[in-house]
Image: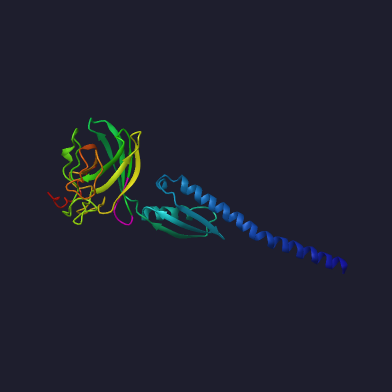
Amino acid sequence: MKILFAGLSVGFLVLAVGCQNQPANRQMKDAAITAAVKAKLAADVRLATLTNVAVTTESGNVSLRGEVETEEQKRQCEEIARSTDGVARVLNDLKVISKAPSVEANFIDSTGKLVGKATLSEESGGGVRIQLNLNGLRAGVHGIHIHEIGECKEPDFKSAGKHFNPSGKHHGADNPQGSHAGDLGNIEVSQNGSVETKLQAPEVTLGVGPNSLLRPGGTAIIIHARRDDQKSDPSGDSGEPIACGVIQTAPEYPAVTQTRK
């Protein structure tokens, strides 16, 4: 009898240890599946632009969460996960968030020398964000505006036309009848001649429409010699242009409303 009880005790002990090891083994398998899916996603050149995809695995069931740029990328991620060894099922919770369009404007000064660039990106809530990275400018505060023609002929940049103003308003945020869609306020250039800053242009777009900066003929950004007073027509008493950058043309967009004369 003692031998029988001892044998039963050993059997129960082995069974208990085996049951305890099952969750640990499952976790190890799930971790291996997660790592394998992540590696395959990272290795696929079609998905090279993705940076926000999270992969988790529970009992062989893979969950995909995060953001992709297209429905095709969403499908590709799921396809890759399904093809991974050990995957039982794929829950695809990826959200398609279209990449905001962006363009650049390369700036020259009145002598034609390159002095930096601006990167313009569409904001998800509307408007355009402008990242400026410039050097070789006069130190101080300078008015800055978007102009209606994409041409920068030095030295005076008059080829860029008037301010971008499809609504026909007056100039300046402090003008009760303003402001132009292209009014960007002021920037401050440091003593070493450089400026790195972000500006918001809430009334313009890089998409289709009358306020598109990618209109036929293009648009441009001009920096002026002095501070913009934010109220005086036509350009806030900001002086002569000292730098200009062309925003590239996209011929497929319709022409905008004529700007105010």
Depth order, front residue of 254/23: 254
Q: Relative to 159, say whether 22 is above or below.
A: below
Q: Relative to 44, say whether 167 is above or below.
A: below
Residue 9 located left or right of residue 112: right
Residue 1 screen position, x and y as percent: 87, 69
Q: Residue furthest bottom?
A: 1
Residue 5 screen position, x and y as percent: 83, 68
Depth order, front residue of 229/215: 229
Depth order, front residue of 62/100: 100
Depth order, front residue of 44/216: 216
Query: Which residue is pictured at 27% across the width and 47% down the height?
Result: 185
Residue 162 located left or right of residue 21: left
- 182 in magenta: no
Residue 114 screen position, x and y as percent: 28, 32
Residue 219 screen position, x and y as percent: 21, 44
Q: Relative to 56, say whether 248 is above or below.
A: above
Magenta-tinted stretch? 124-130
**Colour scheme of the picture:** rainbow
